[in-house]
Image: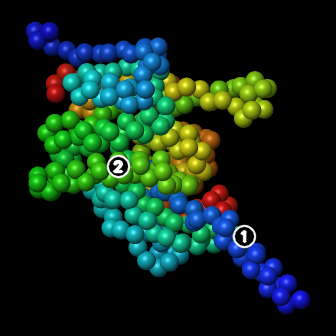
Amino acid sequence: MTFFVRTKRKISGLLKALFRKRTFRIGIYGPPNAGKTTLANRIVRDWVGDAVGPVSEVPHETRRVRRKEDITITGQNGGSVTIDIVDTPGVTTKIDYNEFVEYGIEKEEAVKRAREATEGVAEAMHWLREDIDGVIYMLDSTQDPFQQVNIMLIGIIESRKLPVVIVANKNDLPDASAARIKSAFPQHPVISISGLEGNNVDELYEKMTTYFG
Amino acid sequence: MEMIQGVQIDLISAERLDRLTSMEKIRLILDDVMEGNIVILEKGLAPEEQSKLIEITMREIAPDGFSGIEMETYPIKDVQGGFLSKLLGGKRSESRLTVIGPANQLKTLKKEKDLISAWVSSSR
């Protein structure tokens, strides 16, 4: 009897190992300054007690894709999901080093930043094509959601049939309008949060456990 | 041509685009835009092609030179398919009329889901 039980356990363990999918990689995408790294830091801090990277008012602060592995998020309903969080550089179709100069950065450093930012965007696009299983699409809800980069990226994400949750960020600001974002992308769930203040992030966690689970 | 102040606009037909491979399309667009021209595509790029266009545009950006592209198109429209297409999972429409230009010359003034208003400057 013990032999059978042991064998059964061994076989079921082998089967589990064979069919276990690697951790779901969730990419945080969006235009520059939407608050991607702020949210990534919050998720990682809330569930692992660590941080992903520095944040700044200057666009393109994140110029490399950063991945944080094995984050288990538990929702209020008790459901949980284990994911890798992939924080990506803001995607754009244009980068001019003068933009950094306007923030008081020296020309030489600004040119270097611009070059790194272009590499970062290319890297983010590559990840989206190759290595991402689901997307949190971050939008600054004080901005116009119809910007071309959003239309393009959502189209690219949809064509890859990746599950996407749209986050209407910065709901602590007076001009924020999640309704505008909902009307722009009615085909996807939209959750209004403030990554900075932590408003409503529980609803996002809840959504993540059901949507990416 | 030197005498006239202005901007060249190239309208590329869907037939011509259909004959090109993805890389040929991207190269055609970028070479044209990098010369300071505005390109209008009768039929826009597929999502995969848009993704590559962003990536290759990034590679071409140089300090005090090309600073990238401005591109405008409408959101992909869902096609209301008939019974059969619903049964087979429905079908998305092709991408739509698209305008692409150098980022320092083409500015979008207003964009709604059914109207795009843009402004082109001739100074480079």
- In depth, the one of A171 and A80 nearer the eye is A80
Distance from disc 1 to disc 2, alpha carbons, whole Å, reads 39 Å
Other-residue count near label 2 (Cα within 10 Å), few / some / many at <14 / 14–19 / ≥20: many
CB atoms at circles 1 and 2 under 8 Å apart? no
Seen at 50% across and 41% down, the residue is A156
User: Would you say A34 lies left or right of A188 here?
Assistant: left
Other-residue count near label 1 (Cα within 10 Å), few / some / many at <14 / 14–19 / ≥20: few
Residue A62: percent from the left, percent from the top? 33, 59
Point out the image quarter for the N terminus of chain A.
bottom right
- In depth, the one of B106 and B110 nearer the eye is B106
Of mark 1 and mark 2, the one earlier in the sequence is 1
Q: Amino acid at mark 1?
A: Leu
Above or below, comparing residue A160 to residue A7 in the picture: above
- In depth, the one of A153 and A103 nearer the eye is A153
Residue B33: percent from the left, percent from the top? 27, 26
Give the chain of mark 2.
A
Q: Is residue A136 visible?
A: no
Marker disc for residue A121: 2
Marker disc for residue A15: 1
Q: Amino acid at mark 2?
A: Val
Seen at 49% across and 55% down, the residue is A131
Residue A113: percent from the left, percent from the top? 21, 54
